Amino acid sequence: MPIRDLAAWNAMLHGYCENARVDDAVKLFEQIPSRIVISWTSMIGRLDQNGKSEEALTVFERMFKSGVVFNPSTLTCALSAYPNALSFPLGVQIHGHVFNSRFCLIVFVCASLITFYANYK
């Protein structure tokens, strides 16, 4: 990659994931010098979409601990991963974050919460 700015890193990350090269995307993600919420959210969502929900939640936890402020899309990706990873208590914690952050006023976040609870039997 001749120009290594944040847009290029995120474009490469997206390209790897679009072509089912998730392991390469993870390696690239680890090399990104300063990840922004877009980088984290992309990685969380793509890991979950490729059957790696546990890894997606690990990335979400790392993001949270690193102090990056999540956005509604991040929460939606994380909520999608919780039922797949069979991690109900942690998903309920995310519900708390949704409520406290006032993202509960955003329709697609509410839809993700409904889907989260509906997927548990």
Image (cartoon, helix red, strand yellow):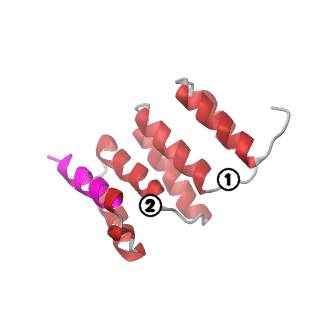
Identify which amino acid the numbered label 2 is placed on. Answer: Pro
User: Is 34 drawn above or below residue 104 in the view shown?
Assistant: above
How would you rate the neighbour count of disc 1 (Cα within 10 Å): few for under 14, some for 14-19, many for 20 or more?
some
- Residue 90 visible here: no
- Residue 24 position, x and y percent, is 63, 28
Residue at 54% x, 43% y: name it.
Answer: 43
Magenta: main secondary structure: helix
Residue at 73% x, 48% y: name it.
Answer: 6
Q: Residues under labels 2 and 1: Cα distance?
A: 17 Å
How would you rate the neighbour count of disc 2 (Cα within 10 Å): few for under 14, some for 14-19, many for 20 or more?
some
Q: Work out whether mark 2 precedes mark 1 in sequence or the reverse, and give the earlier one.
A: 1
Residues shaded magenta: 109-121
Q: Is residue 16 left or right of residue 53?
A: right
Which residue is at the front of the view, 84 or 106? 106
Which residue of the protein is positioned furthest toward the left in this rendering? 121
Residue, disc 1: 35
Q: Quadrant of residue 92?
A: bottom left
- Residue 38 position, x and y percent, is 59, 52
Residue at 24% x, 50% y: name it.
Answer: 115
- Residue 47 position, x and y percent, is 48, 37
Viewer-nearest of labels 2 and 1?
2
Residue at 66% x, 38% y: name it.
Answer: 11
Which residue is at the front of the view, 73 or 91? 73
Residue, disc 2: 72
Which residue is at the front of the view, 18 or 119? 18
Q: Secondary structure at mark 2?
A: helix
